[in-house]
Structures are given as C-alpha cells and as structure tokens.
Image (spheres, grey):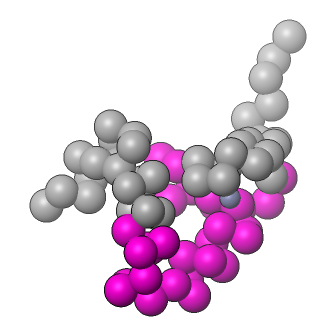
Amino acid sequence: MYKRATGVDSCGICKQESERGFYLLSMWICPSCERKMVELEVEDPTYAWYIERLRGSTMNSRMLSH
Ligand SMILES: [Zn+2]
C-alpha cells in the first residue's frame, strides 16, 4: 500500500483537513488561513498568534530566525 504523495493534508494552523492549500515553509496552510494571514495587520494580536504557530515547527523556526 502506498500513501498518496498529494492529497488531503491538515492545516498547521487550524488543523482542518484541506485538499487545497500550500506549504508555507514546512507547514501546510489551508486557503481560509492563507486569506486570514494576508488580511491581517501586523499590529493585530492574531498575526503574532499565526507567527507563533509557524514557529512551532523546528524547521520553520530555523528558517525564520535570521
Ligand atoms: Zn487553516
């Protein structure tokens, strides 16, 4: 049995499974979270929350800390 390389993945932010989306660094982002991130102001507390979620991955935190 082979796992499909492409298919449903669960969003790294809202944990909802989504067939459509994209990988932001190593985290799968669903279209609704992508839209929210684009619309958020940097001053918005929710924005910081999203960044925290992204830093949750070891790979991401390494890539985000310059
Ligand atoms: Zn999501």
Looking at the image, which residue is at 58% across and 48% down?
12
x and y percent of residue 2 in the render?
A: 81, 17
| View extreme (front): residue | 45
| Image quarter hosting the N terminus | top right
Magenta segment: 19-48
User: For this view, does 8 lie left or right of residue 66?
Assistant: right
User: For this view, does 3 lie left or right of residue 45?
Assistant: right
| View extreme (top): residue | 1
Q: Is residue 28 visible?
A: no
Judge whether 60 appears above or below 66 on screen. above
Judge whether 61 appears above or below 37 on screen. above
Judge whether 35 appears above or below 59 on screen. below
x and y percent of residue 18 in the render?
A: 80, 52
Q: Is residue 66 visible?
A: yes
Magenta segment: does it hold 20? yes
x and y percent of residue 51 in the render?
A: 39, 62
User: For this view, does 42 lie left or right of residue 7?
Assistant: left
x and y percent of residue 8 in the render?
A: 81, 43
Q: Nearer the viewer, residue 9 or 51?
A: 51
Residue 15, by quadrant, is top right
